Image (tube, rainbow, N blue to C red):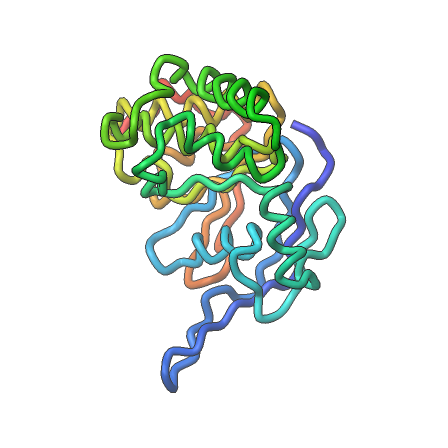
Amino acid sequence: MSTETIIQMQHVNKEYQMGDVTVRALRDLNLDIAAGELIVLLGPSGSGKTTTLNVIGGLDRPTAGHILVAGDDITGYNSKKLTQYRRQKMGFVFQFFNLIPTLTASENVEFALALVEKDGKRLQDKARDLLQMVGLNDRGDHFPSQLSGGEQQRVAIARALANQPPVILCDEPTGNLDVETGQRVLQVMRDLNHQRNTTVVLVTHNSVIARMADRVVRLHNGSIADISENVHPAPVSELSW
């Protein structure tokens, strides 16, 4: 893990208006994330985990404060520049996979690659390499309905890696998986983190999963309640929930 900071959240606030009620989803968050770090955002539902992920990923804008990614302040980006930022800098892995059901596993990955790669042969080769990286080189011609939940999530990870983003954002990636399948998915994330130096920010409510992180940021009611370092992160194989 590098000591270089890749993400800086500076006094970040996020408010939503629900009728006459103002909901403060994030309250003055200050957080630095190092390049190559695997960090877990931990907390119960409503603590601000997903909102934090969304503002880092450019899926939502903070009400106040600044978010710097590789030194660039993304809070000043217009919609077009935010779209470019998401394509080039961020990979997204969600709880519900979000695969296109009418496309095969390979085609789902190719669809993401096509945003930057136009050569058809290279497109197919890259998709095959990415599926091989997540252990699915023999499942490329299968549709999502023909894959297990864990396999679908690994396709989603391959898709998130399509443009080699420096940061992967994961929102409850094991939420719909059993323990054994969830371990496989988490191992893929850890391997990517170690082998590619990819920064991983993973949201979970599960304190057991947090044991694999380099650092754990505990959120409560939109604020950072605690930040702790795992000097010796637990191997994924030792996690059971």
Residues 227 and 65: in front is 65
Outermost residue on the bottom side: it is 20
What residue do we see at 46% from left, 62% from top?
Answer: 222
User: Looking at the image, can residue 95 be seen?
Assistant: yes
What residue do we see at 61% from left, 35% from top?
Answer: 165
- Based on the displayed image, in which of its 4 quarters is residue 137 positioned? top left
What residue do we see at 67% from left, 56% from top?
Answer: 81
Residues 67 and 112: in front is 112
User: Looking at the image, can residue 238 be seen?
Assistant: no
Residue 131, how many percent across, how many down?
45, 20
Q: Quadrant of the C terminus?
A: top left
Outermost residue on the top side: it is 138
Residues 176 and 127: in front is 127
Number of labels in the image equals: 0
What residue do we see at 44% from left, 53% from top?
Answer: 49
Residue 60, how many percent across, how many down?
52, 61
Residues 107 and 219: in front is 107
Outermost residue on the front side: it is 120
Please give left or right for residue 5 compared with residue 228 in the image: right
Residue 213, how many percent across, how many down?
49, 32
Please give left or right for residue 147 compared with residue 89 in the image: left
Outermost residue on the right side: it is 71
Q: Quadrant of the N terminus?
A: top right
